[in-house]
Amino acid sequence: MSYEIKVGLIIENPVSGILDFRQAKHALGIDSPMRTWRLGDRLDTRSKRVRASDGLWYGFFEGRDCDPIEQASRLLDELEARGDAARSVLRNNSTELAITVRLYGHDTPPFNLTPQFIDRLQSFGLQLDLDLYVFCDDTDKSRVLPDRDQ
């Protein structure tokens, strides 16, 4: 039994053309690929729903069985090192620090939101988006419903 985590940034702007992807990538020091979309793009190829903003997703970290807040703090450290250019991009757009945790079985990842961590989020104008998915292990007998005949 274990858990997986993903940590990244979602940056969006509802005004088309305001979010400059190249400038954001440079200001944030992103050297890996990022997913981008424009206002009006479809959510996916099967959907008729369209995006209501320009935006980008930067996946900072993916891993197993580690502290999600520690990894998010590493991202904040990197943003602090980028200085005012990074702060400008983050504050001029709607920005979320996204943490996804996928639990398998009964594991519990460490997840301690300290006042210092919350203060750091606020200093960048970041919102926290936490997605938690729990998947029962096949061997987890406590989740099995009893027979109706019994």
Image (tube, rainbow, N blue to C red):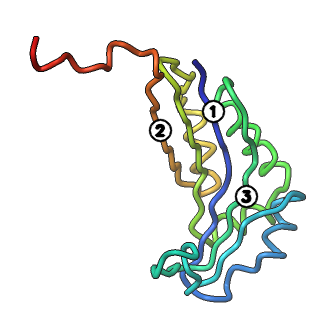
Q: Residue furthest front?
A: 149
Nearest-to-viewer mark from 1 and 3: 1
Q: Is residue 18 above or below residue 70?
A: below
Q: Position of residue 97 (x, y in %)?
A: 61, 51
Sequence-first disc among 2 and 1? 1
The amino acid type of the residue labelled 1 equals Glu
Q: Taking 67 as reference, is 100 left or right?
A: left
Up-down relation of residue 31 to residue 106 (above or below): below
**C-alpha gap between disc 3 and disc 2:** 20 Å
Crowding near the residue tagged with mark 3, few <14, some 14–19, many ≥20 C-alpha atoms within 10 Å: many
Q: Mark 3 points at which residue?
A: 58
Q: Say what amino acid the circle numbered 2 marks.
A: Tyr
The part of the image, by quadrant, that contains residue 32 is: bottom right
- Relative placement, left or right, of 44 versus 72 is left
Residue 119 in the image: above or below residue 94? above
Seen from the viewer's position, the closer of residues 80 and 2 is 2
| Label 1 sits on residue | 4
Classify mark 1: helix, strand or loop.
strand
Residue picked out by circle 2: 133
- Mark 3 or mark 2, whichever is nearer to me: 2
Mark drawn on residue 51: none
User: Residue 96: image x %, image y %?
Assistant: 58, 56
Q: Which corner quadrant of the image does residue 69 belong to?
A: top right
The C terminus, quarter of image:
top left
Measured Cα–Cα span from mark 1 to mark 3: 17 Å
Q: Is mark 3 on a helix, strand or loop?
A: strand
In the picture, measured across the screen, residue 36 lies left or right of residue 85, that is left
Locate residue 20: give its quadrant: bottom right
Q: How crowded is mark 1: few (under 14 residues within 10 Å), some or many (20 or more)?
A: some
| Circle 2 SS class | strand
Disc 3 residue type? Tyr
Other residues around mark 2 within 10 Å, as few (<14) / some (14–19) / many (≥20): few
